[in-house]
Amino acid sequence: MTMKQLIRLMTMTALLAAQAGAREPMDPPGKPNEDIYDIIERLAGDEMTLAQRAEYFTHYSPVVRREASKSLMREGKKAMPLITKALKSKDKRVIRAGTDALSGPFGVGMVGRGRRELQAVMTPDIAGAAAPLLAKLLDHDDLYVRDGALLALSNCGKATVPYLDKVVKMTANDHWWVRSSASKVIKRVGAPQSDKHAETMTRKFVAEPYVYPKRRLQEMVIELVKTGGKKTQVLQIVADALPLQKRDYFRYLLLEGLYKLGPDAAGALGGVEKLMAQEQQALARAPRGERAAIEKEIAYIQKVLDRIKPSKAGKERPRR
């Protein structure tokens, strides 16, 4: 399937869903039955005014709305009046398109060119103007809007500081992707402001039951240790938790975080050593059929120990 066919398929799915359950008018701006792929090509060009691009925030297709957001994002300060208007809209689709214009074309996982484009236009004055509006959206009744606001706040840097308490509350949300977005905000705010929440967020990292947000929380904890003032407390929480963890992928993520920190994770060394002793005892009691798996765990833990406390073991990234 080509990209053009994929976009059309996604658009038709969105249109059918809209026609089946929407109470709001879902007609796109512009010509009736305008080809979706043609709209996207026009949004990527220079022929449309900023106001014309913003009109596509109401389009029924999420693909078109994202492309319209991306188009305005590239204009930086010139587009802020239209983005601000979108953030104040009563239409949740328009609001989300406005937040996407401040978080990048796809928000989650945006890397490379898209991320660099956003960094180039997200100046302190834009972040300062956007942050209060985005923080207000954290109280919106639509989950999709709240998540978009968090993704946008993650690009506002220190302008987010006055609203950090609200962001931390979002890390207790029932939906894992919202928790993930909230942890990204805290990571990017950085020290010293994030120190206030360092211990709370580390405990959330230990307890998180889903892989994707746990990885985002891992990144946040690494940042807290490297740049924050609560390094000792953060590492102690991880050290205390390690021997209590099951032998599974979630324990691996705790150990992997310590491996990435290397010597900076020395404060958690006692917990890793206790875990090693625990696994060695388990190996001594294990039946033959279980020994290979435990030996693999022990070898992995040893690599983490060697990374925290350098030895002749080498510096390769540990593998399970």
Image: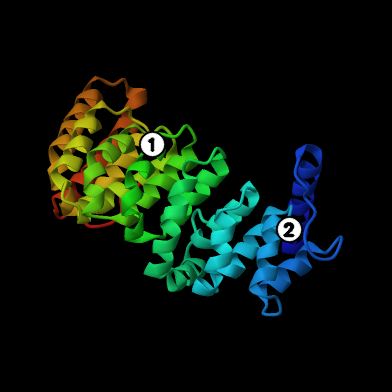
Q: Give the farthest residue toward the right.
A: 32
Give residue 222's position: percent from left, percent from top: 27, 50
Question: In the rendered structure, which disc, 2 or 1, sits on the residue that comes first in sequence?
Answer: 2
Give, as a three-letter code, the residue at label 2: Ile
Task: Give the image's coloring scheme.
Answer: rainbow
Choose mark 2 or mark 1, whichever is in front: 2
- Left/right placement of residue 81 relative to residue 136 reads right
Q: Residue at x 75, y 62 (%)?
A: 2
- Left/right placement of residue 249 relative to residue 115 reads left
Q: Can the viewer see residue 129 in this picture?
A: yes
Q: Quadrant of residue 78?
A: bottom right
- Tell me if mark 1 has few (under 14), some (14-19) or many (20+) residues whose alpha carbon lies within 10 angstroms of its own: few
Give residue 206's position: percent from left, percent from top: 31, 35
**Residue carrying label 1:** 249
Q: Which mark is residue 7?
A: 2
Q: Can the viewer see residue 259 in this picture?
A: no
Q: Which secondary structure, mark 2?
A: helix
Q: Residue at x 76, y 44 (%)?
A: 18
Give residue 214's position: percent from left, percent from top: 39, 41
> Up-down: is 167 above or below 67?
above
Q: CA distance from mark 2 to mark 1?
A: 35 Å
Q: Quadrant of the N terminus?
A: bottom right
In the foreground, 28 or 230: 28
Q: Which secondary structure, mark 1?
A: helix
Q: Residue at x 45, y 60 (%)?
A: 130
In the foreground, 28 or 284: 28
Q: Residue at x 80, y 65 (%)?
A: 30
Q: Quadrant of the C terminus?
A: top left
Give residue 145's position: percent from left, percent from top: 55, 46
